[in-house]
Amino acid sequence: MARKYCWKTGCDVEATLSVIGGRWKPILVCHLLGGRKRFGELRRLTSNATERMITLQLRELEADGVISRHVYAEVPPRVEYEVTEFGRSLEAILALMQEWGSAFKVRRLAEESEGESIATTG
């Protein structure tokens, strides 16, 4: 089922964020870039997210064609998720986000440690 979009600005960045925006979507896609994963694996990898939130985010990613869902007729049922070819086009974007985030954390930690040393010496 395709999702409906209401892009208010018409900006291409808004279109991208409508697909990968949110706290858990980019993280889920990053985990799935490493290969197929079952729901339980994704839940363990994103332990701070609720099951409901993971489910909703996976459904939206599936509706946008970023991931595919494979259901196996077994008891108990087995469901696996994987990134589609279209979803793989996000790999470069997510790698840049990861690189930027790493540099940001280093910068932030340095600022915090500077602030603590000034507070203890001042």
Image: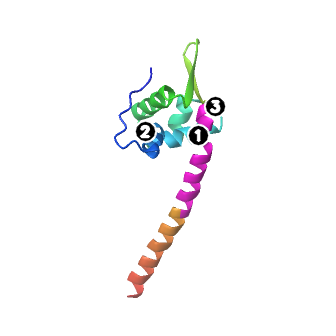
Residue 4 sits in quarter: top left
Separation of residues labelled 1 and 3 (CA atoms): 15 Å
Instruction: Look at the numbered disc 2 and give the secondary structure of its residue.
Output: helix
**Residue named by callout 1:** 31
Which region shows up in magenta? Answer: 85-103
**Residue named by callout 3:** 85
Question: Label 1 amino acid?
Answer: His
- Identify which residue, 17 or 121, lies in the foreground: 17
The 10 Å Cα crowd at callout 2, few under 14, some 14 to 19, many 20 or more, is: some
Residue 113 versus residue 93 in the image, above or below:
below
In this rendering, would 72 be left or right of 25?
A: right
Question: Label 2 amino acid?
Answer: Ser
In this rendering, would 118 be left or right of 95?
A: left
Q: Position of residue 28 (x, y in %)?
A: 53, 38
- Identify which residue, 24 or 100, lies in the foreground: 100
Which quarter of the figure is the C terminus placed in?
bottom left
Residue 103 versus residue 38 in the image, above or below:
below
- Identify which residue, 106 or 77, lies in the foreground: 106
Instruction: Look at the numbered disc 1 and give the secondary structure of its residue.
Output: helix
Contact? badges 1 and 2 (CB < 8 Å)? no
**Residue named by callout 2:** 18
Sequence-wise first label, 1 or 3: 1
Answer whether residue 91 is magenta in the image. yes
Q: Position of residue 85 (x, y in %)?
A: 64, 31
Sequence-wise first label, 1 or 2: 2
